[in-house]
Image: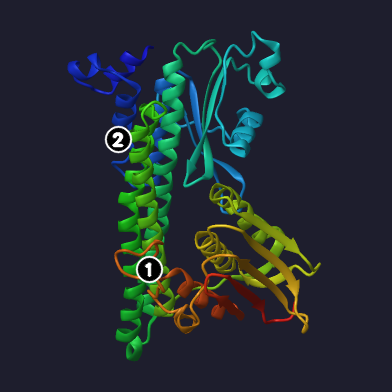
C-alpha cells in the first residue's frame, strides 16, 4: 500500500489526494482521534490507523501504570478485532528499549538478516516490527507497536516517518483522554462525597467543593487549547525547514515561548487558588534531597546558565541528605529560586550549597552575583503578584506569583526561607528544613 492509497481510505477528496502529503495524513487522523476524550475510543482509533498505515498484521498499545510498570492495554489485528494477547507474546526487548530510550525502532526483514533477529523475534517468527514512544510534555507514557510475519520490507520511508509523527501526536491525545478520565472519576467521587455531608454543613461544604471543582475544570479547559496549539506548532515545525529561514525560526521560538509562559502563569494561579481554598493535599514522604531533587534541578538549568555565560555550581558539604516532605513542593521551591537566581544574574555565578547549620538542621543556600534586591522591597518579596520592577517597561518577565508559591510550599512543609541581599551585589536564599533530619 502506498501513502496515496491510505489517503483514499481516509476519505480525502480527489483534490486532497492530488496534493497528498504526510501532513495531510496526520491532520486527517488527528481530526478523528481528537474527536473523543474516551480513552478506549482514542486508543482504538490510534491503533487501527497505525496498523492500516503500516500494512502490519497486529498492533499493540502499551502504557505505563501508576506503579511504573508497562501494561498492554489494547491488542488488535488488521481487521480491527481485539486479540487476547499479553505483553509476553510481542517483542518485549523492542518495547522496553523504545520506552526506556524514548526513540523509535523500525526492524524489517528480521528473519532474513540474522543480525536483526533477537530470540524473541525468532520465536515469534516476525519479519517486520515498528515501535515508537508515546510522549507528552517530555514524558514517555507508553509505546505503540505493530508487527508482521509476512511483511519483509517497509515500502516507503514516508510511511515510517508518518508512523513516527502519528505516535508523537497520539501520545498527546491519549494523555488528554487519561486526564479526562481521571477528572471524570474525581467528579464522580465528589458527587458521592456530597451525599455524605451532614445537613447542617451541606451548603458550606458544597461551596468549598465546588470552588475546588471549578479550579480543576478551569485548569483543564485552559490547558487543553494550549496543548492543541503546541502540538500544531510541533507539526508545522516538523514540516517546515527553519534552518535556511531565520525569520521563521524566530517566529516559532516566539510562539513556543509565549504558549509556555501562558501555561506557567495559569499553573501558578491555579496552584495558589487551590492552596488558599484549603483543599490542597500534601503527600509527605522520605526523600534524598541531593540525589532526588537538587542534582536534577541543577542539571536542568545548566544549559540555561551556559547560554548566559555564567557558572552554575553545586556543592554538597554534608552527608546528611534525608528529608520528609512533599516531593513536588520541595522540587518547585528549588526550581523557582534557582530559576530566579539565573534570570537576575548577568555575569558571575550561581552557587548551590547543601550543608548543616550549627543546630544540625539540613540547609541549602542559593547564592548569586546578580542585580540584588533593594532592602526596602525585601518585606514584600513573597507577596502575591509583587515585583520590585513593575510597569510595561520592566526588563524581566514574571507575574509575581513564583516566590509567593515558594513561601506557601515552605510553610506547608515546615521549611524556613531566609534572604540576604545587597543591591547590585547579589542575593543569598537559605532554605532550612526545621525538623532535625
Where disc 1 sits, the SS reads helix
Neighbour tally class for label 2: few under 14, some 14-19, many 20 plus, Cα within 10 Å: some
Q: Nearer the viewer, mark 2 or mark 1?
A: 1
Question: Residue placed farthest to the front in the image?
Answer: 424
- Residue sitting at 41 percent across and 59 percent down? 264
Q: Is residue 374 above or below residue 89?
A: below
Question: Residue placed farthest to the right in the image?
Answer: 319
- Coordinates of residue 412 in the picture (x, y in percent): 55, 79
Where disc 2 sits, the SS reads helix
Neighbour tally class for label 1: few under 14, some 14-19, many 20 plus, Cα within 10 Å: some
Q: Which residue is mark 1?
A: 269
Question: Residue placed farthest to the bottom in the image?
Answer: 200
Q: Is residue 210 above or below residue 309?
A: below
Q: Is residue 99 left or right of residue 83?
A: right
The disc placed on residue 32 is 2
- Coordinates of residue 231 in the picture (x, y in percent): 37, 41
- Residue sitting at 40 percent across and 37 percent down? 169
Q: Is residue 246 left or right of residue 392?
A: right
Q: Earlier in the sequence, mark 2 or mark 1?
A: 2
Amino acid at each position: 500500500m502506498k501513502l496515496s492509497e491510505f489517503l483514499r481510505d481516509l476519505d480525502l477528496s480527489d483534490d486532497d489526494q492530488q496534493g497528498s502529503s504526510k501532513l495531510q495524513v496526520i491532520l486527517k487522523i488527528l481530526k478523528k482521534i481528537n474527536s473523543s476524550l474516551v480513552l478506549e475510543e482514542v486508543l482504538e482509533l490510534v491503533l487501527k490507523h497505525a496498523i492500516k498505515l503500516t500494512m502490519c498484521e497486529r498492533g499493540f498499545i502499551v502504557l505505563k501504570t501508576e506503579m511504573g510498570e508497562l501494561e498492554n492495554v489494547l491488542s488488535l489485528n488488521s481487521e480491527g478485532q481485539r486479540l487476547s494477547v499479553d505483553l509476553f507474546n510481542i517483542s518485549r526487548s523492542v518495547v522496553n528499549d523504545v520506552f526506556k530510550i524514548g526513540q523509535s525502532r523500525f526492524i524489517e526483514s528480521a528473519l532474513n538478516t540474522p543480525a536483526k533477529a533477537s530470540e524473541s523475534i525468532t520465536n515469534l517468527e516476525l519479519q517486520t516490527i515498528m515501535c515508537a514512544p508515546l510522549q507528552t510534555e517530555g514524558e514517555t507514557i507508553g509505546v505503540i507497536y505493530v508487527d508482521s510475519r509476512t511483511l519483509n520490507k517497509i515500502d516507503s520511508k514516508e510511511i515510517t516517518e508518518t508512523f513516527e509523527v502519528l505516535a508523537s501526536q497520539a501520545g498527546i491525545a491519549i494523555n488528554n483522554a487519561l486526564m479526562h478520565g481521571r477528572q471524570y472519576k474525581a467528579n464522580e467521587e465528589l458527587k458521592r462525597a456530597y451525599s455524605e455531608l451532614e445537613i447542617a454543613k451541606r451548603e458550606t461544604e458544597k461551596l468549598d467543593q465546588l470552588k475546588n471543582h471549578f479550579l480543576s475544570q478551569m485548569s483543564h479547559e485552559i490547558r487543553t487549547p494550549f496543548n492543541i496549539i503546541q502540538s500544531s506548532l510541533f507539526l508545522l515545525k516538523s514540516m517546515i525547514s527553519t534552518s535556511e529561514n531565520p525569520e521563521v525560526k524566530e517566529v516559532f521560538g516566539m510562539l513556543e515561548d509565549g504558549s509556555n509562559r501562558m501555561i506557567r502563569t495559569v499553573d501558578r494561579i491555579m496552584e495558589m487558588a487551590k492552596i488558599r481554598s484549603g483543599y490542597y493535599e500534601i503527600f509527605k514522604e522520605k526523600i534524598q534531597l541531593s540525589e532526588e531533587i537538587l542534582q536534577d534541578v541543577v542539571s536542568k538549568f545548566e544549559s540555561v546558565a551556559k547560554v548566559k555565560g555564567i557558572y552554575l555550581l553545586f556543592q554538597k558539604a554534608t552527608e546528611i541528605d534525608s528529608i520528609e516532605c512533599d516531593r513536588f513542593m520541595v522540587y518547585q521551591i528549588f526550581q523557582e529560586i534557582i530559576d530566579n537566581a539565573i534570570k537576575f544574574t548577568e555575569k558571575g555565578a550561581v552557587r548551590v550549597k547543601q550543608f548543616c547549620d550549627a543546630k544540625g538542621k539540613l540547609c541549602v543556600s542559593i547564592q548569586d552575583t546578580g542585580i540584588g534586591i533593594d532592602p526596602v522591597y525585601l518585606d514584600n518579596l513573597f507577596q502575591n503578584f509583587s515585583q520590585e520592577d513593575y510597569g510595561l517597561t520592566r526588563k524581566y518577565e514574571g507575574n509575581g506569583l513564583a516566590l509567593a508559591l515558594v513561601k506557601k510550599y515552605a510553610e506547608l512543609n515546615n521549611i524556613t526561607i531566609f534572604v540576604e541581599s545587597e543591591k547590585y551585589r547579589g542575593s543569598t536564599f537559605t532554605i532550612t528544613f526545621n525538623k532535625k533530619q
